[in-house]
Amino acid sequence: MQLLIEPDGTVRCLYREAIELAQLGTLLIRRGSYVEPDEQGQWRADLAPSAGPVLGPFRQRSEALAAEEAWLTEHWLTLAEPA
């Protein structure tokens, strides 16, 4: 499990039950995307809640979930470069 600790002490991560996150403080859990099937039975990961794109289509849900996690890790679970 990867935890990003921002300079102000805020901790960000992709939610897992690997550790008891409440031990870190008050939790604010928000959806990062929607992984849903389309009309053709293909899977898409809509990352709009994280200001991201729609990924897919994928044949299997597990592929969409892996793409979702990769995108969130690369684009959301990183510190912004100092200006």
Image (cartoon, helix red, strand yellow):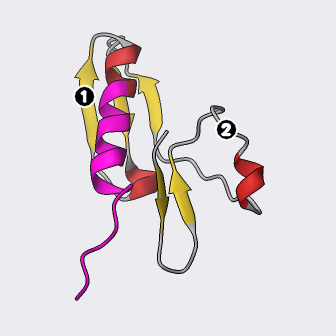
Query: Disc 2 versus disc 1: distance between alpha carbons?
Result: 30 Å
Q: In this image, 30 relative to 34: left or right?
A: right
Query: Which of the 4 image quadrants contains residue 56?
Result: top left
Residue tagged by mark 2?
19
Tell me which segment is drawn in magenta.
Answer: 66-83
> For the point 30% across and 37% down, which residue is it?
70
**Where is residue 50, by image quadrant?**
bottom left
Under circle 1, the secondary element is strand
Q: Residue furthest bottom?
A: 83
User: What number is the disc on residue 4?
Assistant: none
What percent of the width, then of the height, locates residue 44?
34, 28
Residue at the image position 47 percent from the left and 78 percent from the top: 7
The answer to whether residue 37 is above or below residue 29 is: above
Between 17 and 38, the one lying in front of the other is 17
Viewer-proximal residue among 44 and 68: 68
Percent x, y for residue 23? 76, 53
Position of 23 compared to 2: left or right? right
In primary-sequence order, the first of circles 2 and 1 is 2
x and y, in percent, of residue 57 in the image = 25, 23
64 or 40: nearer the eye? 64
As shown in the figure, which amino acid type bears the numbered disc 2? Answer: Ile
Among the 4 quarters of the image, the one containing residue 59: top left
Q: Is residue 41 magenta?
A: no
User: Is residue 76 highlighted in magenta?
Assistant: yes
Identify which amino acid the numbered label 1 is placed on. Answer: Gly
* Local secondary structure at mark 2: loop
Q: Is residue 18 above or below residue 28?
A: above
Residue occupying image coordinates x 65% and y 52%: 29
Q: Is residue 10 left or right of residue 82?
A: right
**Residue named by callout 1:** 56
Q: Position of residue 14 (x, y in %)?
A: 50, 44
